[in-house]
Amino acid sequence: MKTDALFYDLFQSAPELLFELLGFDASLARSYRMDSVEIKQTAFRLDGVFLPAGPDRPLYFLECQYQKDADFYLRLFGQIALYCRRKKYRGDWCAVVLFARRSLDPGVPVGYRAFEVSGQVQRLYMQEQAQSGSLVMEVLQLLPCPRRRLRAQVAAVVERVEREIRVERQRRQIMEWVETIVVEKFPELSAEEIAKMLKSPSLRRTRVFQEALAEGRQAQAVAMTLRLLQHRLGALSSELSEQIGHLPLGTLDELSLALLEFDSEAQVRRWLEQHG
């Protein structure tokens, strides 16, 4: 799932979301700048770092964890220590860990419990957060939502967008967030079905919708080409099927015409080499 990019976009566009989650005054966000930080030569990336405007406020590290990882805290504290060393940061800090659900939390290792006791590690579980809140919070809560309940929650978010957001640019941004989640949660749906679920004619102009539409056409073209080849040649090797699955639409169109001349997989492979 494109979760990392979505989280970054959400918190960068609405940094007050972090403080809403912590139960603080959302106006604190005006004293912070949110960034995503890659620690060079380590392959470490921190999901979000909220940089204070002055030395009187703590630095916040935000990590969003939506999959099982037994070594999560070892990696997190290693990233924080390395960040502080590289930036020569000696001020106060707090790590906010956002889990999709409690079962994904492996527990803070014994050697790091002091951070938990002092409150420098705050753990939040999205499935246990109150449903009421800001509109961006409701979008965030779509991520851990089970598929069986997602349609109803999406409908509630869309209704709230239509009711509360009057600025077209803001409305489009929120709908792109919602659409990204729906596309990832329901990969089997066509772009038209996704548009129907979201009940928004303006959705057709969004970047995510156009990508989904292109992906839908691509999938249909791949499926049709593979069916035609299998009808003519019989079962295809998984390697060849995978190769055809990565062809652009234009090449698939050409292949669908040329396949009438093929009598073996070898001829298909030669054709692909010539048109690759």
Image (cartoon, rainbow, N blue to C red):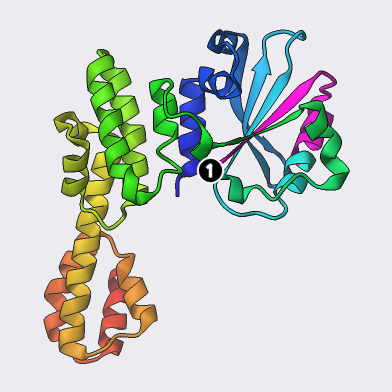
| Secondary structure state at the residue bearing disc 1 | loop
Instruction: Choose between 12 and 145: the one closer to the eye.
Output: 145
Give neighbour class at mark 1: few <14, some 14-19, many 20+ (Cα, 10 Å): many
| 63, above or below 276, in the image | above
Q: Confirm whether residue 11 shows in the render.
A: yes
How far across and down, in percent of the image, does residue 219 sit?
24, 61
Residue at image coords 48%, 43%: 3
How far across and down, in percent of the image, does residue 178 sit?
33, 35
Q: How many marks?
A: 1
| 239 relative to 71 in the view: left or right | left
| 212, above or below 33, in the image | below
Question: Does the magenta portion include 90?
Answer: yes
Q: What stretch is highlighted in magenta?
A: 79-99
- The quadrant holding residue 203 is top left
> What amino acid is labelled 1 in the image?
Ala
| 122 relative to 137 in the view: left or right | right
Residue at image coords 28%, 25%: 172
Instruction: Choose between 30 and 141: the one closer to the eye.
Output: 141
| 156, above or below 133, in the image | below
Q: Confirm whether residue 276 shows in the render.
A: no
Question: Does the magenta portion include 191?
Answer: no
Instruction: Choose between 181 and 21: the one closer to the eye.
Output: 21
How far across and down, in percent of the image, does residue 259 sit?
16, 80
Name the quadrant of the C terminus: bottom left
- The quadrant holding residue 79 is top right
Residue at image coords 23%, 18%: 163
Residue at image coords 72%, 8%: 54
Q: Name the residue under label 1.
A: 100
- The quadrant holding residue 93 is top right
How far across and down, in percent of the image, does residue 36 sit?
60, 31
